Image (spheres, coloured by chain):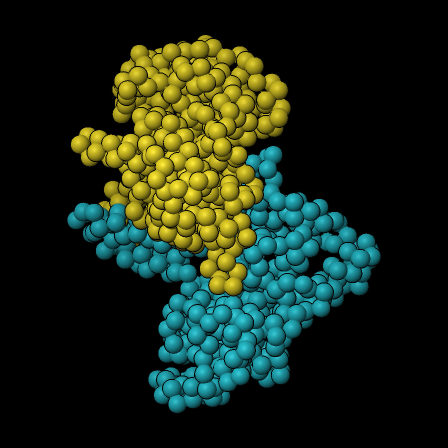
Chain colours: A cyan, B yellow
């Protein structure tokens, strides 16, 4: 299966234009030579850019698109003017089965609106979600929703938990990823009613979800659970707060090491430490936010990312496509929804079997 | 006025017991020798602890309290059993005018419930809020609410803005601190209706608030505004997410510098850089969360803080007491509420005059 994976690329999306996209693709191609790319955008421009990447050219098929969706276009407007845009064409390639996933660094709202229109929502999922890969003490965790919905009811939170679980199974090769609901600590104030209701459902043993309970903001980076579930407002604020904190500490580090001759000398000796620190703090290393709940795989790259960051987003798309993410998620959703309706823990369960197979495959590869 | 400032201390609150509290007080006393402390707690224990701090003893009056509020007591239960607790007695000292402020590292919910009962809410303020001092690129900013309320209506958010403004005037010696409403970036989804409504009111020029608009999570650490307004759920998640991120990066720094002989040598040379970095990353340096909206000054210290952190919380209480915070806030609240009711920008305005006086005082001191 891996030999046939094709990723559709909206080459015109992002703040830095197609040259960053192509640099990123070249990085990704070096690590994943079996993957093919469909490149949507201005053909003349892309052809010129491709000349810089001779190795990549063989893995790429160019498809001309007349226009690009601007970063500040409203989603409704983007939908109206979708025809001829590189974003719409790139998504449609997934719908038509010509690609396993689409990656775009373009306008998030437009990408979500077009993806919903083209691919449609997964059966029995009401609301899509955007997931973030979050660096943590144990590696990576998944946080969702980080911005697709401002509010989330208990049943939306349950769906986010299921979808996050499916994502963690594929990305972390875990059979039974742990799930936490983001809440606040104060005893008397334990969260909104929707969170308390969702917690009651998630606890239901017949759903067989590895739900560990409420987690707080600092549990995300601690890696207390594999999947942190929250509404899109809270998740988006948390994500950007973490980015801002990392940036602030970066300033503190630079200030501290440039304060005297001795500290500068120390920084010189420890050059490789700074390099590895910079790499670990680079938000690009965890770039790539999969859209959850659609009948197709869409991965959003940060608009302002560099080539390394773009490669990370493409690699997330590749990992998820290799793990047959959308079908796996559909099975998980079906299993849990059936159990919810029937209160039956003996539901035929393709989800666990495929998880075991994948884990075995991961272990030998 | 400064010569008469007395701070009431709940010496039994916190995870680390009275010895940390007294170590912290000794730090604060060294920087603020004109401040007197009323120390509430187990007299025999406190007397023994005080022997270690001979300089501090002269600034302290011990007042025996039979019991302490446990960290896991529910607020309602704490209220019922308040008599004889060090927390209640320490708060009552503020109500009775024997102290200008109270500091406790104890149970947050209990401290808020007891403070409301003893001191009462400020006239025309519905909901109290807890403020956090947040380190940022420009120094410190104030974020509120970080946990007193799970939800906030538009009028609560407006009150938080007014109270945060008053706090920033006193702590940052600014005449007209800037205010932002925490929101998410996605265009179509600009926040909950309460946030959009609050924004409309905050823009009203007759209120003369320096409202700059919506800010996002990363603007908090960037120091885009002096006061970041949000509901207690989002604020608490953001605060703990930032703490968790700082802890994670601390791990990254340690890992990076211990990876080879050369990086270890660099770390040795740059010892002072690590020291200053550690100090800047120490959450204790920004410890001290004032309760807003009460008829009296209450400052919550983090329960698990060390002596330096406790001293920071005491210093926040001292700064706010010196700046006559509660009266200044009452004036700001009255001015804005009157303007709201009358739509009149010519309201007699003691707030600005006193801000100017204070700024001048700060400039010469």
Q: Is residue A85 visible?
A: yes
Q: Give the residue displayed 46% in from the left and 51% down from the top.
A: B199
Residue sitting at x 25%, y 53% = A267
The answer to which image quadrant residue A240 occupies is bottom left
Nearer to me, A45 or A73: A73
Residue A145 at what x, y percent from top left? 57, 58
- Whole-percent x and y of residue A175? 66, 59
Mark yes or no: residue A238 visible. no
Picture residue at 82% right of the left edge, 57% below the top: A342
Is B105 rendered above or below residue A237?
A: above
**Residue B278 in the figure: left or right of residue B106:** left
**What quarter of the picture does the C terminus of chain A occupy?**
bottom right
Q: Is residue B323 above or below residue B347?
A: above
Picture quadrant where residue B285 is located: top left
Q: Position of residue A222 (x, y in %)?
A: 50, 48
- Up-down relation of residue A138 to residue B37 (above or below): below
The quarter in which the N terminus of chain A is drawn is bottom right
Which residue is drawn at the image coordinates 67% and 52% (left, top)?
A154
Q: Nearer the viewer, residue A155 or B274?
A: A155
């Amino acid at each position: 299966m891996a030999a046939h994976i094709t990723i559709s690329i909206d080459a015109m999306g992002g703040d830095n234009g197609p040259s960053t996209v192509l640099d990123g693709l070249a990085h990704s191609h070096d690590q994943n030579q079996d993957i093919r790319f469909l490149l949507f955008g201005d053909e003349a421009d892309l052809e010129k850019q491709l000349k810089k990447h001779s190795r990549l050219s063989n893995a790429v098929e160019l498809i001309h698109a007349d226009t690009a969706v601007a970063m500040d276009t409203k989603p409704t407007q983007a939908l109206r003017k979708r025809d001829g845009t590189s974003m719409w064409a790139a998504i449609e390639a997934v719908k038509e089965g010509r690609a396993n996933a689409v990656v775009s660094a373009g306008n998030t709202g437009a990408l979500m609106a077009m993806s919903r229109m083209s691919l449609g929502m997964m059966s029995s999922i009401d609301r899509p979600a955007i997931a973030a890969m979050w660096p943590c003490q144990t590696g990576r965790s998944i946080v969702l929703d980080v911005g697709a919905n401002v509010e989330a009811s208990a049943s939306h939170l349950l769906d986010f938990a299921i979808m996050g679980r499916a994502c963690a199974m594929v990305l972390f090769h875990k059979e039974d990823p742990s799930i936490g609901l983001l809440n606040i600590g104060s005893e008397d104030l334990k969260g909104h009613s929707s969170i308390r209701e969702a917690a009651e459902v998630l606890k239901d043993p017949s759903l067989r979800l590895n739900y560990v309970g409420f987690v707080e903001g600092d549990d995300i980076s601690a890696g207390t659970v594999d999947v942190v579930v929250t509404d899109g407002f809270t998740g988006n604020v948390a994500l950007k707060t973490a980015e801002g904190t990392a940036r602030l500490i970066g300033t503190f580090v630079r200030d501290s090491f440039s304060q005297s001759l001795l500290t500068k000398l120390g920084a010189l000796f420890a050059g490789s430490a700074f390099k590895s620190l910079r790499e670990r703090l680079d938000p690009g290393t965890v770039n790539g936010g999969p859209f959850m709940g659609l009948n197709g795989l869409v991965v959003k790259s940060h608009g302002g990312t560099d080539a390394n960051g773009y490669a990370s987003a493409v690699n997330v798309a590749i990992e998820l496509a290799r793990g047959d993410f959308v079908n796996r998620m559909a099975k998980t959703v079906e299993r849990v929804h059936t159990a919810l309706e029937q209160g039956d823990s003996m539901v035929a369960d393709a989800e666990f079997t495929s998880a075991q197979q994948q884990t075995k495959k991961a272990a030998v590869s």
